[in-house]
Image (cartoon, rainbow, N blue to C red):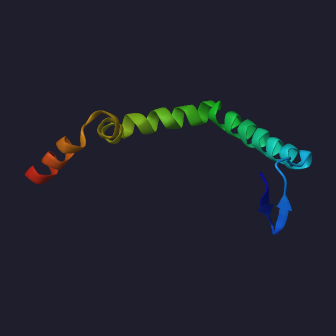
Amino acid sequence: MDYKKNGKLLSQETDITDIGIFDETRKSINSALYERVSSPLYGTLIISWLVWNWEIVYLTFFVNESRIEMTKSTT
């Protein structure tokens, strides 16, 4: 199966350097995200946000849409 990239016809085989660039970028993004998530500051921030905004989380995950509509119409 052939496809075009930037006007050039390419075969099904991919260039090794393209895979390496994407793999390196993915690893870089993953390591940056892991470093930020594993920080105690961000963990505390996430927990405090969840405690402060518990109603948003509760409504998002545990209440049916029909119940929300019913509540809107009665207020």
13 vs 8: above or below: above
Q: Residue at x 75, y 42 (%)?
A: 26
From the viewer's perspective, tell me whether residue 29 is left or right of residue 67. right
From the viewer's perspective, tell me whether residue 36 is left or right of residue 46. right
- Point out residue 8 in the picture as x, y percentages from the top left corner: 85, 66
From the viewer's perspective, tell me whether residue 28 is left or right of residue 62. right
Q: Is residue 30 visible?
A: yes
Q: Residue at x 81, y 67 (%)?
A: 6
Furthest residue in direction front, as rendered: 1
Q: Is residue 75 visible?
A: no
Front residue of 64 and 29: 64
- Point out residue 24 in the picture as x, y percentages from the top left corner: 83, 42
- Point out residue 17 in the picture as x, y percentages from the top left corner: 91, 48
From the viewer's perspective, tell me whether residue 22 is left or right of residue 68. right
Quadrant for residue 50, please give it.
top left
20 vs 8: above or below: above
Furthest residue in direction bottom, as rendered: 7
Furthest residue in direction left, as rendered: 74
Front residue of 45 and 11: 11
Q: Residue at x 11, y 53 (%)?
A: 73
- Point out residue 46 in the picture as x, y percentages from the top left corner: 50, 36
Number of dots carrying numbers = 0
